[in-house]
Amino acid sequence: MADHTPPLESGQLHSPELQILTSPPTPTMVNGDGPQQVILVQVNPGEAFTIRREDGQCQYIHGPAQVPMMSPNGSVPPIYVPPGYVSQIIEENGVRRVLVLPQQPEFHPGGHSPLHHPPPPPHAHLPAFIPHPAMMPPPPHLYTGMAGGVGDMSSQYISQYHPAHIYSEQVSADSHSQHGRPPYGHRDDRTSKTYERLQKKLKERQGGAGGGQMKDSPPPSPQKTCNSPLTVDIHNGVGGKGLEAERGQLSSAMAGPGKQTGRGNNGDLGELDEESRALQALLSTISKPVVSDIQARGAAVSWSAPTRPERENSGVEDDCNPLEPLSYEVSISISGKDGKYKSIYCGEELSAPLEDLRPATDYHVRVQATCNCLQGSPSEAVSFTTLSCKPDPPNPPRKASGTKNALSLQWKAPCDNGSKIQNYNLQWDEGKGNGSYAQCYYGPQKQYKVTKLSPASRYSFRVAAENDLGESEFSEVVDLFTSCSVPLQPLPPELEMAGVTWLCLKWQRPTSSPKEDDIFYTLEMEEEGSGYGFLPSYDGNELSCTVKSLHRSTKYKFRVAAYNSEGKSNPSQVVEFITKPDRPSSPCRPVIRGRVLPNSFKMVWEAPRDNGGADITKYVVELSEGLSGLSWELVYTGPAMEHVCEGLKPGCSYQTRVYCMSEGGQSSLSETLQVQTPAVPPGPCHPPRLVGKPKAREVQLRWGPPHVDGGSPVSCYAVEVCGSQSEDSREVYQGPELDCSVAGLMPGKTYSFRVKAANKAGFGPLSERCEVTTGPGAPEQCKAPSTTCKSPSCVVVSWEAPPCNGAPVTEFRLEWGAAEGSMQICYSGPGLSHEMKGLLPATNYFCRVQAVNVAGVGSFSEAVLCQTPCSVPAAVSSIYVMKESELQRYETTVDADEDQDEEDRSCPCTPLYSPSTCLGICWEPPCDHGSEITSYLIDLGERQPIVVGPVTKYIIQRLQPDTSYRIRIQALNSLGPGPFSHTFKLKTKPLPPQPPRLECTVFSHQTLRLKWGDGPAKAAASDALQYQLQMEDKSGRFISVYKGPCHTHKVQRLNESTSYTFRIQAFNEAGEGPFSNVYTFTTPRSPPAPVKAPKVERLDDSSCEVTWEALPPMKGDPIIYTLQWMMGNSDFKQAYKGSATSFHVQNLQTNSDYRFRVCAIRQCQDAPELSGPYSPTVTLSPQRNDMAVGGSASGLGSKANAESNRARRSLTDEQCAFLLLMVFAVIAILIAFVIQYFVIK
């Protein structure tokens, strides 16, 4: 590597006066030929890129990083590099990338100058991504940029940088080489070869520099695998996807290894293009790794690269990008094949060491290939088991127990690493402390007792475990001490702190005892006057103790003794300490002595029940005004136990409390004593004043509270009134309000008013007088008015004027109504009478009157009841036509006809009324106006009126069908007839239709088709005229078999040779017509059923036997059969007729075909014979000579021949029918052609 240019140092890249972008660019930014272009500056690891801001400061960007800069005019800013390096511009997919590369003799930077660079192709869209400035770490060193540069680019380039920690797992999605190769094809061969040589040298430099680095250290070159969880992986070149791919790589890299997915051109999750899918499929063909050199804690794994397809023209250089080197990720699992895998290696080598493994453990390892951020599927996992080894070092032994001459040691077993531990090797330094150890125990036990030791001495121990594979390393060295001799007498304990119920004591360690000796202490205590002597209160190794649960102000004696495993020392000298006194309890609740005055009271209290062990020095009294107790005032301090509280307010609440103090402290507060000073009556109030304008009988007064309330809030006020002529006063109001309304006064009078206030102590003095004169009042209540009926619909009401109360009456108001609670004003004026018209006869009315003046409205008079006289009835409001169902149920006595005799007239009957000749009407009874209705008069126009009784229904008979009538009704009572109702037009229905004539058109042995009337066989259900067909059943009743508008009906499921009786009825909206006469129809006899095809059996050349199945007799009629045969194509001839079911046919010709068929005949007793249909035809073909083999022409062979001939004959019939059909079709086509050609044309 000596002939190569050394790598760049930090701070050697410099671009003057370039601005850092601190806000996202506008969304209209595009790559290529747009208004702005993106230029990427690639900063390799270990390098630094310097940009000068607008404020003059320099911004350092450390590699690895990519610095996107936006160029408004598409030009490339000048990049200053140190000697030995050149800047190269590469364009991929419309994005320009600036690379800093070592200069080689073969390298010609002029070929890539931006001045000769073709314009970049347009880019679709570049979404902006700008990290926050706070995310960029500050540079560790500051370097001065190079002087000079072009100044016109200072404000035209805005850079976007990516901090290194953001790209910890990122790689360019489409970078295919270390420094990228331009995808365009306009380069010449010399330039392409130069670029390839440069790329090869860069790879060699990278391999030499990074060969000895660890996996956690970032390589000096920009080459890095996509899945590396370490630092940056930025290629010196832009992939085909541009910045959008880098955004997708950032999001996928943050997801961690093994969770990355394929990325599209725009960086989002989506489907891969065809090239990426092919590459991913290639990466997935990696074979299963091979594990070798398996040791206890390590192994070596190797694998083969995925097979790559060979290029068709390998010898010809093209302009395509060279294939990127593959990187591999090795993952290992300790939890099985399907368990969780951990990545242990990422790199480009085809082998990797497996280190830090556990001995005697099963592992699964797999490898996964990666290229251009595309990961293939992991390979098949291979399993291996590490070897066993010597045990792990055990933990240091611990001291279980010990004396001054012996130590008991224990230790725990370490991990055996696959081989059972056989022995333990315990070594010690024999107390020499020179670092040399000798074996003191060797065996399988995990404990050992070392004896014959020196007291108070230090010994060092270590232990090792041994199995079949060797001895482990020794544990850490542990120092243990033996016990010492009996301690000396300690010094007496000292008092560190005293409390009411506790004493904190401390003591010192005996001076002669070494620090390594474990010394324990026993503290003994004796309470003065208890008589129990010294009792232990503490036992432990601490040098201090707090003795609790003691009595206050009590003397206690203490002594301490020390002991160890060898014995106990003599107790120390006895010392005495006294606990502190406790604070006294609260004094008793104070009480009142004597009577409480409005301005003072005397209180006394008793001493506390418990003084806490010390005398009370003083008492403190506190006083609080009010019941809230928020503020307290100190009113007394001294030894006395009584006090007089003076200067109080009358009618005020006070709270007082006491506490005492002694040497032990301040006691708690006593219970609170609440004292209420008595109140005095309040002072005089302000004189009342008039509020508003005085009314005739009422005035509104208001006053103010007294200046002095007497120590108690004013609870009520009392108002007294006195007339001008009388000296007696009366109380008109008492209440808590400061205003009142005084009523019950006389209009136009003068009154004087006074007010006084009261509290719980009583009423105070009266205020000064206030004189008020009332105003005029409303009139008095009128007397009840009088009523006079002039007619059934007219009443005259009159009244008298009431007292006016100082103002003349200007108006009277009369209220009138049919109910006392719903009267309305019907008159308003100065008159004293009014005439009411348009009233209803025989109706109750109420009226009252009211007087009005300028002062107001007087009260209404009492209501007076007035009843109008009776009158003729009112007119009938409406007439309704009775329904047909109501008409049939209506019963009445038929009106007597002039030609009927008296017997018929006196005989009631209930006829059925026809809606064609009768009209049933009903009406609502009108108002009778006080006199009961006696009858109704029905006017029919031209006919004579009909008078009926007090009914609301009537049937008018003997009317013309389908005729309209004008009807009106008049009600009558004892006072005369009332008015006629409105005229109603009613119409009778037409007469019901007559039944049609019934005929039988089609009949069979099971069905009868009947027809009636003239019309179609099928009709709509909405036809006005419909029919009902009924048939008589076996019991003689007629049942309905059809009901509808049709004129035909087929009666099915009948018996043969049976007579059935029918009748028919027509009906429409006018009603049901009469039934027709009874019609009788008889079904014929049924013919026999068809016979199955007969069976033909050839007996010899000239005879055969025909058999068929027999049919049962039909209702006692016998069945005979007719057998017909036909030779060739001649007519059928009868061969047999009789009751037998077989027949022997003779004299048959040998070379002719015969066909046979059978027909059943029913022989009726009183009717001619009935022939059934013929059976299917059976063919008997002539017997062939070759079918008779060895004289075995049995009946079975003849039967098979007959069946075959029958099938062949059946097929011939079908062919004949088809032939005839074709002949007719041809003839029809010819005739049509002749007509078309000769006739029409």
Image (cartoon, grey):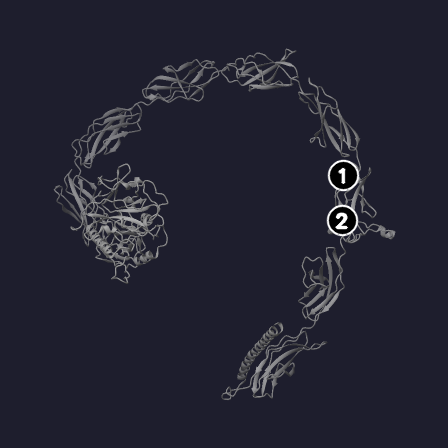
How far is the residue under mark 1 from the one under mark 2? 24 Å
Label 2 is placed on what type of residue?
A: Leu
> To which residue does mark 1 refer?
927
Q: Position of residue 812 (x, y in %)?
A: 71, 24
**At numbered mark 1, what does the secondary structure look like: helix, strand or loop?**
loop
On the question of residue 421 being in view, the answer is no
Q: Position of residue 1148 (x, y in %)?
A: 59, 87
* Residue 546 in the image: above or below residue 198: above
| Residue 1081, picture quadrant | bottom right
Residue 986's mark? 2
Q: Position of residue 661 (x, y in %)?
A: 34, 19
Residue 226 placement, left or right of 435: right
* Residue 1018 in the image: above or below residue 64: below
Q: Residue visible at 82% across and 48% down?
A: 942
Q: Position of residue 402 (x, y in %)?
A: 19, 40
On the question of residue 87 being in view, the answer is yes
Label 1 is placed on what type of residue?
A: Cys
Residue 882 placement, left or right of 589: right
Q: Nearer the viewer, mark 1 or mark 2?
A: 2
**At numbered mark 2, what does the secondary structure look like: helix, strand or loop?**
strand
